[in-house]
């Protein structure tokens, strides 16, 4: 991990197109501004991790019983 | 061309049916080639099957059949980053991934699967701009699109 120390209003350039600017520092909180092209998505780390985790859960327990499990749920609702 | 799958055996997929996820799917970044499977037996559920990993199948559901007020395609499309294709009504397919166990079925409304129909480009879009969306919304009750709401 590259570690840089910045003050309020200072910036970091990532690649040629992504700019991170420190907007405000208040106690433990840092307000960060991000400029990035439309094809680069920006997310809070914990949100991205939650998506990854849920995708793994959705794909997990992938025994061949998955389809009969699904079928038993759909059968119940037909009644 | 034929592809092996764990759950559906050998499937025949035309080149123009292959959906390309240029950035993969979070947790499965290296996998970019998928196909949508819709089998009557499992309606209202559909499947996103990996063509590179036979054991990887995501179960999909149409969120608009089960959740009132879900963001529409035009709003969701703003988070689609892998291409710059403009919004055209009807061109964007929105599905949500379902997690299932013996007790319950939940849908991930925070990060739908978004597919541009014409170019067959797909992305899992994270909807951080909307409040109230998370990864485990129970689907209760289950009903197919053709049934009326109670």
Image (tube, coloured by chain):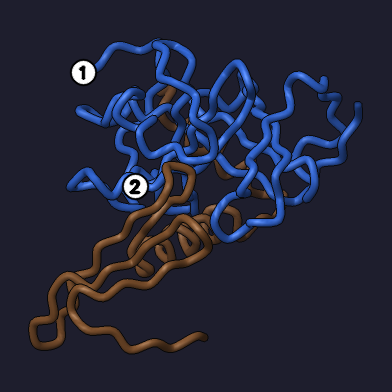
Marking on residue B24: none
Q: Quadrant of residue B112?
A: top left
Residue bearing the label numbered 1: B150
Q: x, y (%) of residue B43?
A: 53, 23
Sequence-wise, the earlier of marks 2 and 1 is: 2
Q: Is residue A54 visible?
A: yes
Secondary-structure class at tag 1 = loop
Residues beneath discs 2 and 1 located on the same chain: yes
Q: Residue furthest right?
A: B1
| Residue A45 vertical position relative to residue A73 in the rendered view, above or below | below
Marking on residue B110: 2
Q: x, y (%) of residue A68?
A: 63, 41
Locate the C terminus of chain A and report the quarter of the image it occupies.
Answer: top left
Q: Is residue B106 visible?
A: no
In the image shown, does A39 or A45 lie closer to the viewer? A39
Hue of chain A?
A: brown
Q: Quadrant of residue A28?
A: bottom left
Looking at the image, residue B67 sits to the left or right of residue A53; the answer is left
| Residue B121 vertical position relative to residue A37 in the rendered view, above or below | above
Nearest to viewer (mark 2 / mark 1): 2
Would you call the spot at circle 1 few (<14 residues within 10 Å), some (14-19), or many (20 or more)? few
In the image shown, does B101 or B119 lie closer to the viewer? B119
Looking at the image, residue A53 sits to the left or right of residue A10; the answer is right
Looking at the image, residue A15 sits to the left or right of residue B141; the answer is right
* Chain for numbered disc 2: B
Secondary-structure class at tag 2 = loop
- Tell me the residue at 27%/30% (across/down): B71
In the image shown, does B63 or B9 lie closer to the viewer? B63
- Tell me the residue at 22%/27% (across/down): B68
- Tell me the residue at 49%/37% (across/down): B113
Hue of chain B?
A: blue
Mark pair 2, 1: CA separation = 26 Å
């Amino acid at each position: 991990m590259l570690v840089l120390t910045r003050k309020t209003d200072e910036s970091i350039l990532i690649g040629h197109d992504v700019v991170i600017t420190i907007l405000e520092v208040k106690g433990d909180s840092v307000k960060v501004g991000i400029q990035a092209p439309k094809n680069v998505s920006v997310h809070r780390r914990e949100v991205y991790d939650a998506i990854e985790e849920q995708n793994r859960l959705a794909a997990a327990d992938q025994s061949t019983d998955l389809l009969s499990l699904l079928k038993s749920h759909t059968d119940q609702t037909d009644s | 061309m034929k592809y092996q799958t764990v759950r559906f055996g050998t499937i025949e997929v035309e080149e123009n049916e292959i959906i390309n996820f240029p950035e993969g799917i979070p947790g499965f970044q290296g996998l970019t080639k998928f196909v949508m499977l819709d089998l009557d037996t499992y309606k209202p559920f559909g499947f996103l099957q990996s063509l590179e990993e036979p054991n990887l199948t995501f179960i999909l559901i149409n969120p608009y059949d089960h959740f009132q007020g879900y963001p529409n395609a035009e709003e969701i499309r703003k988070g689609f980053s892998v291409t710059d294709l403009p919004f055209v009504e009807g061109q964007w397919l929105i599905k949500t991934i379902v997690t299932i166990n013996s007790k319950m079925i939940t849908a991930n409304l925070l990060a739908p699967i978004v597919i541009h129909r014409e170019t067959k480009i797909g992305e899992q879009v994270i909807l951080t701009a909307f409040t109230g969306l998370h990864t485990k919304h129970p689907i209760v009750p289950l009903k197919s699109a053709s049934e009326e709401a109670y």
